[in-house]
């Protein structure tokens, strides 16, 4: 048993959620290593995940920019109509103290998701192409991870559905091009998050440095 | 599904703390106990976050204080040809119920009242449970913690709904919807409860358990 031999921290992996410690045995591609005590997903490597994530990230970046400026939803009632983009929706909290909320909303649904995508491109591209990691890659990935709970594009998309239900009896609603972009976007963001094995990224950043 | 095994016996699982080591919570690298900053990812490492509970409660109280005005002030101001109407969260849901969409009313009530209140109770329960031996197994509490962390962000949906409706329904004299001051308090409440949940050091759930199982050999281990 490992408790009798002196432990080399390099050969161990700890569960961030419950602090259980295991000897490191990287699972094969496509398999997942869970913490035996609390079930936390420790390692989940996938073949070609790096390339897939880069492709997804590029698509997401383009979609976020496009989706935030193109008209998103259009409503019409009694001959009048109004169409808005996502940026306009975020900036609706514009009187007085609500400006803070406008900035926060814009950050949560556009800027933070966009920043996370750009950071992961910056970190992963050199790793996937077998180059030494980009300067500050470790910091960049750490920031991207810290921002993860604050990236709320998918929540905004569900919010649209709720808002639509509430508005439809008041006026007619048409979907703009940005609505469909955003729907695809949400799907891609979730996909990118599942593909990404954090441990593998940290490990590759580590190996190439020493 | 592959499980990481140190020794093959679940009851024998040792925490990094027991082994005189410390785990980085960002990248799961293990270091000697005296390490302060993870050399792999640069994250600060601590065996146990001793200020965790203080921060949990501080954010909890802030979040709760913001939740009260969020329910008292109007969330939405609806202006139609004939009238101006201001709705609080609960008032709006009651209104919807009367005008024949009980489904939507139920969704709003669950998203804006039931879930936030349940979240406050869950975080408080977790924070209290780690200071004493608890009857609820660490496994169940870990699940509860994961649920709280996952659901926390989704409360922001209310704010987004208000933003979408207010920007969309701007038909000059015919009808206009504007956000009310409750939206700011509600957003702050969601953010503070998210910070409160993040401040919680979930490793403490298992520490008390480990101390308890020292006395009567591993009963709730799964």
Image: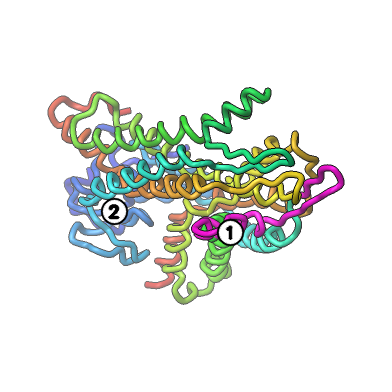
With B13 as the anchor, is B66 left or right in this view? right
Q: Quadrant of residue A63?
A: bottom right
Give the camera-side residue of A70 and B99.
B99
Task: Tell me, yes or no, whether dots 1 and 2 are on the same chain.
Answer: no
Q: Nearer the viewer, residue A84 or B23?
A: A84
x 18%, y 45%: residue: B18
Which quadrant: the N terminus of chain A? top left
Image point 42% across, 62% down: which residue?
A142
Q: Residue furthest left?
A: B215
Where residue B222 appears, as percent x and y from the top left, is 33, 28
Residue B105 drawn in magenta: no
Rendered view: B123 above or below A114: above
Query: Would residue A186 appear left or right of B175 to someone viewing this image?
Result: left
Decide: few, some or many residues near mark 2? Use Cα within 10 Å; few <14, some 14-19, many ≥20: many
Q: Circle 1 sits on which residue? A: A94
For marks 1 and 2, give the CA distance. 45 Å
Which subunit holds the residue at mark 2?
A: B
| Element under disc 2 | strand
Read off the magenta span: A74-102
**Residue B211 - label:** none
Residue placed most toward the observer, A85 or A17: A85
Q: Give the image location of residue A194, x and y in percent.
A: 55, 48
Residue A101 as seen in the image, left or right of residue B176: left
Residue that label 2 marks: B23
Closer-to-camera residue (B207/A169)? A169
């Amino acid at each position: 048993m490992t408790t009798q031999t002196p432990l080399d921290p390099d050969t161990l992996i700890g569960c961030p959620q419950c602090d259980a410690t295991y000897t490191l045995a990287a699972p094969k591609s496509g398999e997942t290593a869970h913490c035996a005590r609390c079930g936390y997903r420790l390692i989940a490597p996938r073949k070609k995940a790096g390339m897939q994530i880069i492709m997804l990230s590029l698509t997401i970046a383009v979609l976020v920019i496009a989706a935030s400026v193109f008209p998103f939803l259009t409503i019409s009632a009694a001959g009048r109509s109004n169409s808005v983009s996502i940026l306009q929706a975020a900036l609706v909290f514009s009187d007085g103290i609500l400006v803070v909320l406008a900035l926060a909303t814009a950050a949560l649904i556009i800027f933070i998701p966009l920043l996370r995508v750009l950071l992961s491109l910056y970190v992963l591209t050199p790793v996937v192409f077998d180059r030494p990691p980009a300067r500050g890659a470790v910091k960049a990935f750490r920031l991207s991870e810290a921002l993860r709970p604050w990236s709320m594009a998918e929540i905004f998309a569900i919010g649209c559905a709720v808002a639509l239900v509430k508005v439809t009896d008041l006026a007619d609603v048409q979907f703009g091009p940005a609505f469909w972009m955003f729907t695809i976007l949400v799907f891609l963001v979730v996909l990118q998050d599942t593909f990404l094995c954090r441990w593998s990224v940290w490990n590759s950043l580590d190996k190439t440095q020493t | 599904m592959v499980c990481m095994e140190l020794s093959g016996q679940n009851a024998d699982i040792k925490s990094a703390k027991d082994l005189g080591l410390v785990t980085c919570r960002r990248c799961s690298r293990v270091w000697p106990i005296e390490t302060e900053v993870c050399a792999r990812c640069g994250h600060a490492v601590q065996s146990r976050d001793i200020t965790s509970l203080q921060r949990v409660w501080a954010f909890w109280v802030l979040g709760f204080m913001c939740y009260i005005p969020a329910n008292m002030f109007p969330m939405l101001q609806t202006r139609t040809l004939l009238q101006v109407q201001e709705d609080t969260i609960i008032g709006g849901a009651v209104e919807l119920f009367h005008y024949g969409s009980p489904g939507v009313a139920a969704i709003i009530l669950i998203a804006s009242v039931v879930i936030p209140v349940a979240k406050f109770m869950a975080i408080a329960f977790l924070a209290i449970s780690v200071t004493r031996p608890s009857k609820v197994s660490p496994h169940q509490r870990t699940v509860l913690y994961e649920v709280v962390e996952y659901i926390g962000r989704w409360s922001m949906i209310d704010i987004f709904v208000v933003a979408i409706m207010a920007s969309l329904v701007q038909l000059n004299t015919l009808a206009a919807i504007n956000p009310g001051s409750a939206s700011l308090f509600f957003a702050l409440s969601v953010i503070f409860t998210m910070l409160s949940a993040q401040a919680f050091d979930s490793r403490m759930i298992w520490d008390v358990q480990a101390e308890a199982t020292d006395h009567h050999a591993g009963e709730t281990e799964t």
